[in-house]
Amino acid sequence: MQVLYFAWMRERIGLPKEEVETSAETVAELVEELKAREERYAAAFADMASVRVAVDQELTELSASIIGAREVAFFPPMTGG
């Protein structure tokens, strides 16, 4: 599946997107797999309260299923101005 990173998440990880092979069934399990990869992932996902997630371009929660998903995107909350 494609995993996309936006804003400061992309800066901390150093990639805008990557293809990920995973056995995770939920977003939360995917996050744990990514955090275990390297320190840069652990740093990017350290505070999940400041991270939003979309599965196949629909906003969702960490408990959401990713079984059969083509894309998971992580990004900070949007602010108006």
Image (cartoon, rainbow, N blue to C red):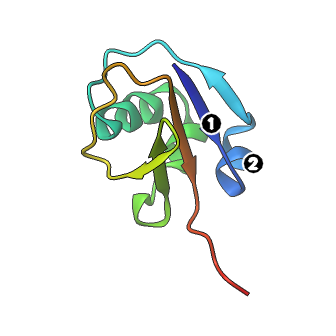
Give the residue pinned by disc 1: 4
Q: Which of 76 and 67 is in front in this view?
A: 67
Q: In this view, does 23 lie to the left or right of 58?
A: left
Q: Which of 36 and 2 is in front in this view?
A: 2
Amino acid at the residue labelled 1:
Leu
Q: x%, y% of residue 50?
A: 49, 66
Q: Is residue 58 left or right of residue 75?
A: left
Q: Nearer the viewer, residue 67 or 29?
A: 67
Does dot 2 land on a helix, a strand or a loop? helix
Tag of residue 11: 2
| Residues packed near mark 2 inside 10 Å, few (<14), some (14 to 19) or many (20 plus) | few
Q: Considering only order in the chain, which callout, 2 or 1, is on the residue closer to the N terminus?
A: 1
Q: Which of 68 and 74 is in front in this view?
A: 68
Q: In this view, does 13 lie to the left or right of 37?
A: right
Q: In this view, does 33 lie to the left or right of 57?
A: left
Q: x%, y% of residue 16?
A: 74, 36
Q: x%, y% of residue 19?
A: 60, 17
Q: Residue at x 64, y 78 (%)?
A: 79
